[in-house]
Amino acid sequence: MTSDHPALAELARPQQLLLDVGQGARAVRGYLGTAPYGGQGLQVYGPLAADRLPKVQLKMMAGSGEAYDCDAVLDEIWGDWSEGGGSATLSGHLRLAGTQAGHSGAQASFVAVRRPFVLARERLPYVAALHEDLISPQRRYYHQLWHASRDRWHRIDESRRQMVRALGWQVGPLGKERNARGHDRHRNGSGEDFLFMHRHMLHGVREVQDLRSWASLPAARPSIGQGVQAFFDYLDNRDGYSVPPNWQAAGDEAFSQWLYYVKSSQGLHANFQLWEAQLHDPQYLSTLCLGELGSRIELGIHDWLHMRWASLGRDPNSDYPMPYGRRNYDFSERWFRAENDFLGDPFSSHVNPVFWAFHGWIDDRLNDWYLAHQQAHPGEVKPKMIDGIPWFAPGRWVRVAEPWLGPSREGCGAWGLGNGGGTGKLDIETMKLALQVIFSPEEDGDRLADRVPQRPWYARHLAPGPRRDGL
């Protein structure tokens, strides 16, 4: 801010302008000052109307009574670069309240530059050995293929299924595959595969680093009226678990509105917290078999968790915003870089530290399910170790004896190479072939029809919220 007038000189020092626009708000509230916040700064008020944008009028008031009028413009030069909390500037003029706008009175000009959102990886670092493993091609290919084969099995034709079987990547026993999204998804045991595979992943990473689960779902962003310092701390992502800014996809109103709601405080209170309550309800949990529990979690709150805490995807070369992220079949070198930790894509989501917090929280719900059955049906669910992982024996409430991690036989991959089933050394070429088989129809369709890219993996179905009577 620049000004030669004594009355405005105090405002010329570098300061932070904090602006808060709540969900559905028709006004902006804010604060102008320096840390620690909430002391001697200026309170900011202003109406907010779409037909006035990009112009904004603000009133700034000090506790001692001084007041200032501000005429500002949200600079539109940034275009797509401003999506998802990206580059943005607010420029304008400030004058003493009660004076006319123009050059005859005392005024100050200013430019406010938006601070970039602090990503979770900057607050929650991995130890070097674990980070190297998580960003490895083996990990990336495995996680994407494990999800892709289960999600697409009921949609690919029989000839492609045979190709996937030949590579050892069919989803379960030959001829008795367990798809994750077909009509029998809640009854075929695929939900047990989902829960066990992620418990297996958690067990492995926690042997290297203590990655804690959430004790409960993080609270919504506080409003600036609840405390300026608390508001700033949330925007600064102090604990790594602040919800990243929303973004829009041009021409896809359904996706844009769904994502806005998923990231909103209303979405947390109306949906996430209902899911959370249901997953702690012993009466309800005691009615679910393990497979249905896992399937309903996977296709509901799981997808929402991925997208609520996802930051806008960006091209690792140019940093250009990509509302839909990487295409499923794009394996260019740039996507293997460490900074690709987009939560909306299984190729990269496990690199994001928030992934382990909410998957740990999901895994902890298995104990609630077990205790609910011990209370309602004593002895009907029996603990069992599977490959060193605490699990449950088949019975009335558990269907699958060997949950599916992927190929487990040596020599079942391409050219006789082993896959390891999520353990040991995974054969990259086999996984690449399997992914090509699964996604080649999608790639051909995109090329021939020049379609808009597919939505992020965990947002493809725009999963609805919980039912009142259950997950």
Image (cartoon, helix red, strand yellow):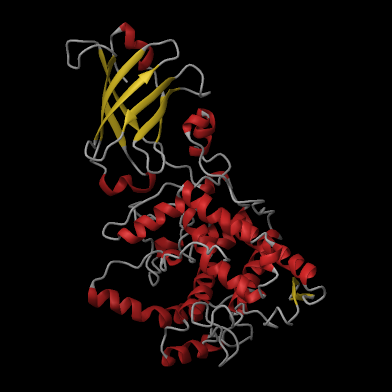
Residue 358 % position (x, y): 59, 57
168 sits left or right of 335 in the view: right
Instruction: Please tell me whether residue 262 is drawn above or below residue 300 in the rendered image.
Output: above
Instruction: Please tell me whether residue 436 is drawn above or below residue 321 in the rendered image.
Output: below
- The residue closer to the viewer here, 270 or 347, is 270
Q: Residue furthest right?
A: 379
Is residue 320 something one can see in this rendering?
yes
- The residue closer to the viewer here, 259 or 116, is 259
Is residue 425 something one can see in this rendering?
no
Numbered-mark total: 0
Q: Please report the residue visible at 59 percent of the width from the left and 83 percent of the height from the top.
A: 188
19 sits left or right of 57 in the view: right
> Which of the 4 image quadrants contains residue 45?
top left
Where is the N terminus found, in terms of image quarters? top left
Instruction: Please tell me whether residue 251 is drawn above or below residue 58 in the rendered image.
Output: below
Residue 353 % position (x, y): 57, 54
Q: Please report the residue visible at 73 percent of the width from the left and 64 percent of the height from the top.
A: 367
Residue 10 % position (x, y): 38, 12
- The residue closer to the viewer here, 360 or 66, is 66
Where is the C terminus found, in terms of image quarters? bottom right
Residue 219 % position (x, y): 57, 45
